[in-house]
Image (spheres, grey):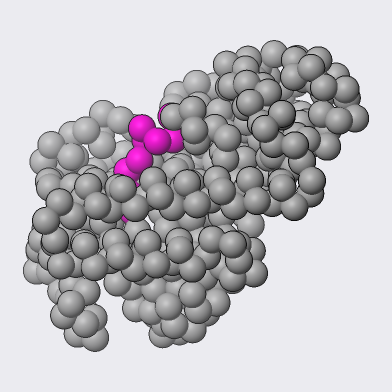
Amino acid sequence: MNKAIPRDIPKKYRQPDDMWTGRVMLNEKEIITFSEQSHVRIWYNNQTDGYPLHSHEAFEVCINIQNKYRIVVNAEEYCLSEGDILIIPPNAVHEYINDSYGVRFIYLIEANEFYRSHDFKSIEPLFFSGFLCNKETCPDIYDRVYGLFMEMNDAYFNRVYFWETLIYTHIYRIFTEIARHRENAAKEEGADLSHSMHRIRALMQYVDINYAEDISTEAAARFTGFSKYHFIRLFKLHTGYTFHDYLTLKRIHMASTLLMGDTAITDIAFQSGFNTLPSFCRAFKKYTGYSPSEYKKLTNNPLSQIDEFNSLHHQEPHRQLYTLTESDKL
């Protein structure tokens, strides 16, 4: 198939490796293979149409440059103004809604190692849905974060020496800035961070392993050694959530991963820590906007078909759309 580069994309922002052949969807699951040389793809996007509901294993960033741009992440809508940065976590169901000309940069980056790191756990609550960074939401870090993304653009499109290493270095710096933003917000509320942060982080690591257990707010407070009242205040300062909401979101996050496989929804409910199937369905719908069965359909991802496809083709996201079904012969 011939590759068509939109005429109005500036030459300096065209893909430098000439490896793109199309965007591949299996149901609403996007298959991302990147190029053979990297785990990064940055697009200069000026399309007048959006992208329908989809998810993928890479994390995604959209920086709006010109005009407005609407993005829905897990049923929460963000209307991006010029300069706004939206970070979309891996496997989040999201949709780009657009019907007019505009310019934005879209980043797809594989960073599984970082998402599994202990450091990420301290800021994970910020990424249960999309994370919006602009001069209003993050005045303390916005300019530095925006500047780092623009430097990533220069490295990517100019293919400077060690460009991928430079990009990943900047990604880690961006997440460090976001962690600093969370710390600054807690300091403004008068929290004694040196006394509480390591205890809250230890609790979050405990929840990572034991999220399916019956963990009450009182039990969580005892784990940290704080009184219940003090714990409730400190936990909200550090995470932005009550402990109950955090535990529920953690369970839903784990359930969403299981829903991508073949496990029955009833089994997933109990494996994720919910006492009944109805309570699981209500909570999942509340926080994601989809019922578990709807989400399972959206993210259905038969691994054998994807592996076979990847062995035969080399495809790139966010350009031309190819839709695969169970009956397709690859």
Q: Is residue 330 left or right of residue 69?
A: left
Q: Residue at x 12, y 46 (%)?
A: 36
Q: Which residue sits at x=48%, y=55%?
A: 87
- Identify the magenta region: 108-116
Residue 281 visible to the viewer: no
Side of 215 relative to 133 (left or right): right
Image location (x, y in percent) of residue 107: 35, 59
> Which residue is found at the position 56% from the left and 28% from the top?
254
Q: Position of residue 16 (x, y in %)?
A: 13, 65
Front residue of 272/184: it is: 184
Q: Please say if 50 is above or below 314.
A: below
> Residue 206 location in percent, x, y?
62, 17
Q: Is residue 259 above or below residue 43?
A: above
Quarter of the image for the C terminus: give it: top left
Total residue callouts:
0
**Which of the 4 image quadrants contains residue 57?**
top left
Q: Quadrant of the N terminus?
A: bottom left
Residue 276 location in percent, x, y? 75, 21
Indicate yes or no whether the magenta region holds residue 111.
Answer: yes
In the displayed structure, 294 sits above or below 305; it is below
In the shown orientation, is residue 29 left or right of residue 89? left
Q: Nearer the viewer, residue 167 or 321?
A: 167
- Name which residue lies at 55% across and 45% down: 179
| Residue 305 seen from this side | yes
Which image quarter: residue 183?
top right
Residue 54 covered by magenta stretch: no
